[in-house]
Image (cartoon, rainbow, N blue to C red):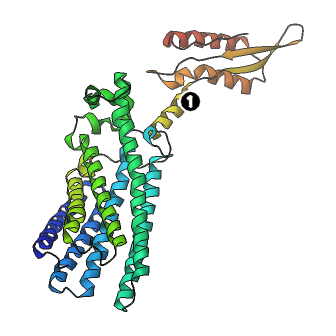
Amino acid sequence: MVPNIGFNLAMLVIWGIILAVNCVQVYWRQWWFSIAFICADILEILGYVGRVIGHYNLYSLDPYILQMVCLTLAPIFTMGGLYYQLAKLIEIYGHKYSLLPSPMAYSYIFIFCDIVSLAVQAAGGGVAATDVADSKSSHQGTQIFIGGLSLQVATMVIFMVLWFYFTWIVYIDTRLKYTGKKFPTWSVLKVPNIQLEQYYREKYAHLRVNPERFLFKYFPLAFSAAVIFVFIRCCYRLAELVDGWSGYIITHENYFIILDALMVSMATVLMSIFHPGLAFDGLHTSIPITKGHVDPETLMNVDLESSAYKYDEDIQVQSGCNDGDVDIQTIHTQTVGKYNDFDKRDELEVVDEVNSFKSSSNGTLDTEVEHQIDDDKEEKVDLKPSTSIEYAV
């Protein structure tokens, strides 16, 4: 098969433009995404350089190996950039929407699988090229190559399951909850995103509704399309290699044009338009990928609120009597509710005094401290009606 010179030159120009655009988009500070896509762009350019050279040197082995290896490996980097975006969307909408233990797990698992797939495919390509150069059978290298592609396809299948689960619970299930419906209908799907804010993480509300930003609103659709395009391409490449180096698929360029060149270029152009730096306001908003199944600020708020509660506490104190006997008296404090607009120190003042007394008076409750606690009790009740403090003496 002689590569079509017009088509391959056009793709070389297109990928040169895409590379320039992706380099400019580094400005929006999506470092992992930008590095991954720029690497993919460079591999695509090298691949089409090999195809252009191959048009004029049909029986030269080097340009054939160059285009085969580079164009096969490039989408691994594309998916590496895409895998990371699911973790970011989980951060934006809330950790509770993560099917895995934390958003960080998505990044670890899929990027690791991507690296393994890259290593296996690169090894397979190297073994096959060496065998061909030595006039040996390339069967062993081809099988390794197929193994790497199979791992890539399997990883993508798992990722798509997790991705579409995420889109269901975030975009569909929340609308069903809001409307009280059991099945998604057109009226359910038309519920504005702003009505669903109660279900999402408050920290990144400005990305979703300030106002409803076009690039963010339609980012999930563009992302879904890009993943499907790359998946189609990977399935094509797997079928091509299984069919053999001299099979029908690999010797007919039309399959390559539609199922590889078109799919990968559309995926990259889509994600360049709906660039995460633009969709996620990369210049002004940092979205670190964190661990855990609960939003970090929720954990922080729980810690702050728990420190403002006075849990049921029994303090046994000894009170001296006239006859020299000892009574055990119980001071019972209970607080209901949490602090709102007043100083947390005011709310905890009574308990602090009791603790101070306990540590300094050897268990003897004198009249002055008792009256002071009673006065503070009344003051706190007046200050915050939702707080009640009882003393059972």
Residue 136 placement, left or right of 250:
right
Residue most toward the left?
6
Could you tell me residue 321's position as x and y percent? 84, 9
Residue drawn at the location 22% of the way across and 66% of the way down: 255
Q: In which quarter of the image is residue 157?
A: bottom left
Q: Nearer the viewer, residue 361 or 50?
A: 50
Question: Does 85 sit above or below residue 304?
Answer: below
Q: Which of 145 and 200 is in front in this view?
A: 145
Question: Residue 385: in sight, yes or no?
Answer: yes
Question: Does 125 sit above or below residue 164?
Answer: below
Q: Nearer the viewer, residue 355 or 263?
A: 263
Residue drawn at the location 27% of the way across and 72% of the way down: 248
Question: Residue 87: in sight, yes or no?
Answer: no
Could you tell me residue 25's position as x and y percent? 22, 58
Quadrant containing the N terminus in the rendered view:
bottom left
* Disc 1 target residue: 307
The secondary structure type at the circle numbered 1 is helix
Could you tell me residue 4's position as x and y percent? 14, 75
